[in-house]
């Protein structure tokens, strides 16, 4: 088969990520207080994964795993504030090698927002780099990037476009929003006077539709789309109508005293005292910003902050409807694998904590993941099988008929997704290094257990997900769980052993 006819059979790949999205923000995951008809449709035409996990609770490491198929300890981008190593092959490199057109739209966060222009292509500094810079970037032939979030996220190609549409004064006003909450704690609600037509989610969909309409149908594509929302600050355009009713939104799931059997950074984060923590690293804890005393968040503020977060997802859902309508119109549904996920979740006050960080609760690490691929995945499926973000790359490579290198940590999950097999894996890892001299933790998740090991500390976490799905009771020191604890720690070791570097052996001696 020549390359052209080979390519006409290869599927298009559309990977869509959001930032910091919880499963309960989607009605297809059972939420009753919100309604996301377009993403529900995507789920109903493919598979809804109820136990898909990220590899790390913050942006850059989690995203690097999505695109490399490697765990954090292997790709090396262990936190935010650093660059994903440029010699790490991404799915973009693999697919470009066989003739795919590769493009990235929206939020990438492969390089830091707060660094200097010399250090980072995605810095907030005004570099005059955009819109001229168009790639290549991490194997993507071309890019149209959005940097940051909400009021500090009208930047990159997206920001330059908005700037070209409005007066200087108007543009400057988009960096401000009105806080409705009594206290500032990261998760509060804000009214934002940006017209919807200039909102980041709308721009992201506009650019995606433009790409889909204009791509050369003879060439398969890999299109990665990164929505900036619903990452805090929770800003909702004042003109947005179809809102979640704050009174119907659940209050945070928190029981007084539940953090007492947890490692010390849990209570320190709740009380806004992370700066005094013995394990504090060189920088403030990623995902907690300057820290806040979450004990001061009133029920009313919590509910409103949550409602605004869910509204941000509703805006994304509407834009997903436009993208899916374009796929329909262009006849691209059959031969396009659409994968929708997020980099990691959000605590939203559950367990007394907001945002994210080294707290590997389900709300933060179990992430919405929907996959539609009519060629192999029957419609209307739900699965409780474990799936890791490192499985995305090998699954896509297999769908494209390409070999999977041993350097990739994930597995081809297509036999599970297609219903041929019950499961793709028995366990998966979440690795977090807050600081190389401070907090370092590894979590292993199995069907019914979750264990977190903290390097250099006597404490740890062990949950029985069957009897205690809300992860309230830490069984680390419970003798009744000693055998489980030993098994799970050795399972972490076994997972890590295969990650060791080994050069090729080509002779006996
Ligand atoms: Ca993120």
Image: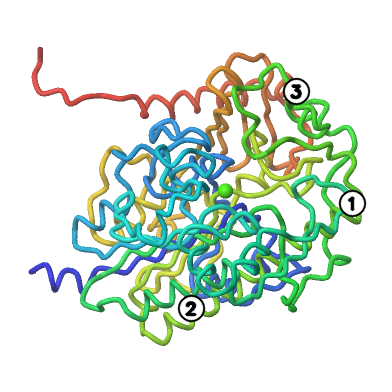
Q: Earlier in the sequence, mark 2 or mark 3?
A: 3
Q: Quadrant of residue 445?
A: top right
Q: Quadrant of residue 1?
A: bottom left
Left or right? Give the position of 415 relative to 363: left
Instruction: Point out the frontmost of discs 3 and 1.
Output: 1
Left or right? Give the position of 359 relative to 83: right
Q: Earlier in the sequence, mark 3 or mark 1?
A: 1
Q: Secondary structure at mark 1?
A: loop
Q: Residues within 10 Å of mark 2 (few under 14, many from 20)?
A: many
In this figure, which colouring scheme has been used for the structure? rainbow
Residue 372 lies, in percent from the top left, at 45, 69
Distance (Cα) linking label 3 and label 1: 28 Å
Instruction: Point out the frontmost of discs 2 and 1.
Output: 1
Residue 458 lies, in percent from the top left, at 67, 14
Q: Which residue is mark 3?
A: 264
Q: Quadrant of residue 362?
A: top right
Q: Which residue is mark 1?
A: 182
The residue drawn where x is 54% and y is 61% is 227
In the picture shown, does residue 422 fall above or below 410? below
Distance (Cα) linking label 2 and label 3: 45 Å
User: Farthest bottom residue?
Assistant: 329
User: Which quarter of the figure is the C terminus placed in?
Assistant: top left
Numbered circle sitting on residue 48: none
Q: Earlier in the sequence, mark 2 or mark 1?
A: 1
Left or right? Give the position of 111 relative to 478: left
The residue drawn where x is 74% and y is 69% is 34
Q: Residues within 10 Å of mark 3 (few under 14, many from 20)?
A: some
Residue 407 lies, in percent from the top left, at 29, 37
Q: Secondary structure at mark 3?
A: helix
Numbered circle sitting on residue 324: 2
Q: Nearer the viewer, residue 464 or 77?
A: 77
């Amino acid at each position: 088969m020549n390359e052209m006819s080979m390519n006409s059979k290869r599927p298009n790949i559309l990977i869509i990520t959001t930032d910091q999205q919880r499963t309960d923000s989607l009605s297809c995951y059972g939420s009753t207080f919100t309604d996301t008809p377009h993403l529900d449709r995507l789920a109903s035409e493919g598979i809804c994964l109820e136990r898909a996990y990220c590899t790390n609770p913050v942006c850059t490491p989690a995203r690097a795993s999505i695109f490399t198929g490697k765990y954090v300890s292997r790709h090396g981008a262990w936190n935010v504030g650093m660059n994903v190593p440029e010699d790490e092959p991404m799915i973009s490199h693999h697919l470009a090698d066989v003739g795919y057109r590769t493009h990235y739209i929206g939020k990438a966060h492969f390089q830091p927002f707060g660094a200097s222009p010399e250090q980072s292509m995605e810095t907030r500094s005004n570099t005059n780099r955009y819109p001229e810079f168009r790639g290549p970037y991490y194997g993507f032939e071309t890019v149209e990037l959005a940097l940051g979030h909400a009021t500090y996220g009208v930047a990159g190609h997206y920001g330059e476009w908005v700037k070209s549409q409005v007066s200087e004064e108007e543009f400057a006003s988009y960096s401000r929003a009105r806080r409705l909450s009594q206290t500032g704690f990261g998760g509060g609600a804000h009214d934002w006077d940006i017209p919807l037509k200039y909102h980041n989610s709308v721009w992201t969909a506009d650019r995606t539709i433009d790409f889909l309409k204009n791509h050369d149908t003879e060439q398969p594509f890999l299109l990665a789309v990164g929505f900036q929302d619903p990452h805090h600050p929770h800003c909702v355009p004042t003109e947005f109508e179809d809102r979640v009713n704050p009174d119907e939104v659940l209050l945070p799931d928190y029981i007084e005293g539940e953090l007492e059997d947890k490692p010390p950074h849990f209570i320190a984060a709740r009380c806004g005292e992370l700066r005094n923590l013995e394990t504090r690293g060189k920088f403030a804890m990623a995902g907690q910003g300057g820290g806040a005393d979450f004990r001061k968040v009133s029920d009313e503020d919590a509910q409103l902050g949550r409602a605004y977060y869910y509204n941000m997802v509703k805006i994304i859902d509407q834009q997903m409807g436009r993208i899916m309508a374009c796929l329909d119109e262009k006849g691209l549904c059959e031969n396009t694998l659409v994968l929708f996920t997020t980099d990691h979740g959000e605590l939203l006050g559950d367990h007394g904590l907001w945002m994210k960080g080294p707290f590997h609760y389900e709300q933060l690490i179990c992430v919405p993941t929907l996959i539609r691929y009519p060629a192999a995945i029957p419609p209307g499926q739900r699965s409780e099988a474990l799936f890791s973000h490192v499985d995305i790359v090998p699954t896509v490579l297999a769908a494209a008929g390409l070999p999977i290198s041993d350097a990739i940590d994930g597995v081809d999950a297509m036999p599970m997704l297609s219903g041929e097999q019950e499961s793709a894996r028995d366990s998966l890892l979440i690795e977090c290094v807050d600081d190389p001299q401070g907090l370092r933790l590894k979590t292993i998740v199995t069907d019914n257990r979750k264990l977190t090991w903290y390097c250099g500390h006597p404490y740890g976490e062990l949950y029985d997900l069957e009897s205690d799905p809300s992860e309230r009771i830490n069984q680390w020191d419970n003798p009744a769980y000693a055998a489980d604890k030993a098994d799970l720690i050795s399972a972490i070791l076994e997972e890590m052993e295969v990650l060791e570097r080994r050069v090729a052996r080509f002779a006996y001696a």
